[in-house]
Amino acid sequence: MGYTFVGHTADLGVVINGETVEELMQSALDALRDWSFSHLSEERSLTSFEISGETETDLWFRLLNELIFLMDKNSAPLKLNLREYHVGRICYLRCDLEVAPNSKRSRGIKAFTLHKFGFSANLVFDV
């Protein structure tokens, strides 16, 4: 689990790693928080939300933009607990998110874009 910032001409590029969907989402959250906030408050609060979409890409798009919306209120995302994640005819997720409200944000992110967005995997075959 983790992330790496990658160069991009005008935007912030991030490659995330994880063995599960929840770990991938946590890595994305960690990258957003670490890049955006210079100080985390000691306060903690929990928020829950549900996101739905037509595709798995829609879920990621809406989740990441929801995180950015929370960050615009100076709430630093800390820990994601993915309660449900369903991809099918209808795609949705339900999660709890621990945040540090009243944190000090040093840099802003306007929105998540789908530019170069995709899924990949590392595969090893026994031969």
Image: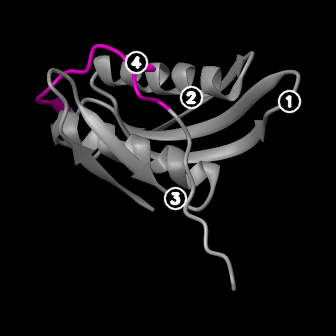
Q: Say which quarter of the image contains residue 126.
A: bottom right
For the N terminus, give its image quadrant: bottom left
Q: Is residue 54 left or right of residue 82?
A: right
Instruction: Check the image and report above or below for 117 versus 22.
Output: above
* Earlier residue among tags 4 and 3: 3
Amino acid, disc 1: Gly
Distance between mark 4 and mark 3 Cα atoms: 21 Å
* Earlier residue among tags 4 and 1: 1
Amino acid, disc 4: Thr
Q: What residue span does the magenta drawing correspond to?
A: 104-117
Q: Say which quarter of the image contains residue 99.
A: top left
Q: What residue is shown at x 48% (from left), y 20% (from top)?
A: 66
Determine whether label 4 and label 1 are within 8 Å by CB.
no
Percent across and percent down for residue 38 are 12, 40
Judged from the image, the secondary structure of the residue bearing numbered disc 3 is loop
Q: What residue is shown at x 17% (from left), y 29% (from top)?
A: 105
Determine whether label 3 and label 2 are within 8 Å by CB.
no
Judged from the image, the secondary structure of the residue bearing numbered disc 1 is loop
Distance between mark 4 and mark 1 Cα atoms: 23 Å
Q: Which residue is mark 4?
A: 113
Q: Which residue is mark 2?
A: 60
Judged from the image, the secondary structure of the residue bearing numbered disc 4 is loop
Amino acid, disc 3: Gly
How crowded pointer 4 is (Cα within 10 Å; few <14, some 14-19, many 20+) is rated as few
How crowded pointer 1 is (Cα within 10 Å; few <14, some 14-19, many 20+) is rated as few
Q: Is residue 86 left or right of residue 24?
A: right
Q: Which residue is mark 1?
A: 88
Q: Which residue is mark 3?
A: 18
Instruction: Check the image and report above or below for 55 versus 83.
Output: above
Q: Say which quarter of the image contains residue 32.
A: top left
For the C terminus, give its image quadrant: bottom right
Distance between mark 1 and mark 2 Cα atoms: 14 Å
